Amino acid sequence: MAISVLEKGNEPSAVLIAGPTASGKSALAMALAERLTGIVLNADSMQVYGDLRVLTARPTVAEAARVPHGLYGHVDADTDYSVGRWLADATCALGAAREQGLVPIFVGGTGLYFRALTRGLAEIPPVPEAVRVEVRGAAEALDSAALHARLAALDPATAARLQPNDRQRVLRALEVITATGRSLSEWQKDAPRPVLDASRCVRLVLEMDRTLLRQRIDARFEAMMAQGALEEVRALAARGLDPSRTVLKAHGAPALTRHLNGAMKLDAAIAEGQSDTRRYAKRQETFFRHQMADWPRATSEDALEQLLQMIKTPAP
């Protein structure tokens, strides 16, 4: 039987579940939603896109039918979706959930989404397309280390918290300072009040043994291939999108595209997709460790009970 925390007088603003890819957080969120009369809201930057349901591990049609879901697959691939747009969409979804008496359960692996939700997001002016093309064109001749060094010379505070191989965020920071004349770190100091008060939320980072997580990542990628991931990538490639579009960088998509173009054997493309996903999981864990250090941790075995216990006794 479903429980409503709203009926019992315990009213956390939301439940926030973060975790590395393939850690089981989506299944945990659905199980919790069934117990709490909740809605599962996506906080993963790739699962917003409609074109790659299998490759981005979005909930299946059957899973989505179990409990209400939101913010999944609502963005076209020919769009570079930003943290700011997600925050606006999440704010609307949060309001709708409250009107319906549903407990909002945000789940995902994009730490920046959770940070924007609970710490606020600077209102940075849009970067003109001409500036974006200029910055990215100049970056093509630079490797990641050189690109990061360029950012360090212009915005050392932002560069200090970004890894050199985090090329997309380095480029974003360069675009901002080029377009506005003001560094990203300066803009972020002026972030408005956050949408959610973290102290009023039930928060959890799902953890998993590193070896087991690697095994799960590899097994899931193979399952994705059996479920039609290659066909998804083929259909996406047929759209002829701008190569810089974010969705084309989904884990596994670049390697599978090279396979479809005849430049790589399928087994090598699968291995590269698995390796890329494992590296991403490591970056996620680093972000959670440094940026979300005050969030409680749990393993998949005890996470549901731990969440239910925290909801019964929310933080004051």
Image (tube, rainbow, N blue to C red):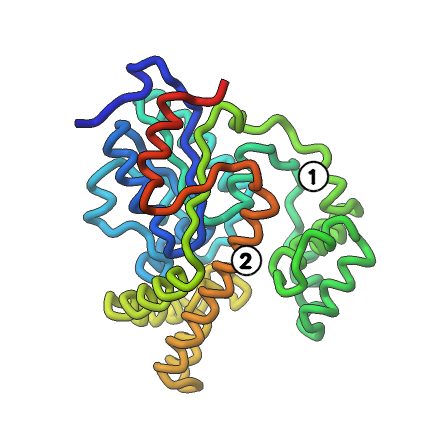
Mark 1 touching mark 2, by CB under 8 A?
A: no
Between the residue at mark 1 and the residue at mark 2, the CA separation in whole angstroms equals: 22 Å
Residue found at x 34% / y 27%: 103
Disc with the residue nearer the chain's start (1 vs 2): 1
Residue 116 higher or lower than 63, as above or below: above
Residue found at x 67% / y 55%: 162
Residue tagged by mark 2?
283
Residue 76 in view, yes or no: no
Residue found at x 51% / y 27%: 196
Residue 275, image x and y in percent? 46, 71
Q: Residue furthest right?
A: 153
Please name the amino acid that badge 1 sits on. Gln
Residues 165 and 77: in front is: 165
Please name the amino acid that badge 2 sits on. Arg
Residues 35 and 115: in front is: 35
Residue 132, image x and y in percent? 66, 58
- Find numbered disc 2 in the image and state the secondary structure of the residue it sits on: helix
Label 2: how many residues lie within 10 Å, few (<14), some (14-19) or many (20+)? some
Residue 233, image x and y in percent? 36, 69
Residue tagged by mark 1?
188
Residue found at x 32% / y 37%: 304
> Where the N terminus falls, by quadrant?
top left
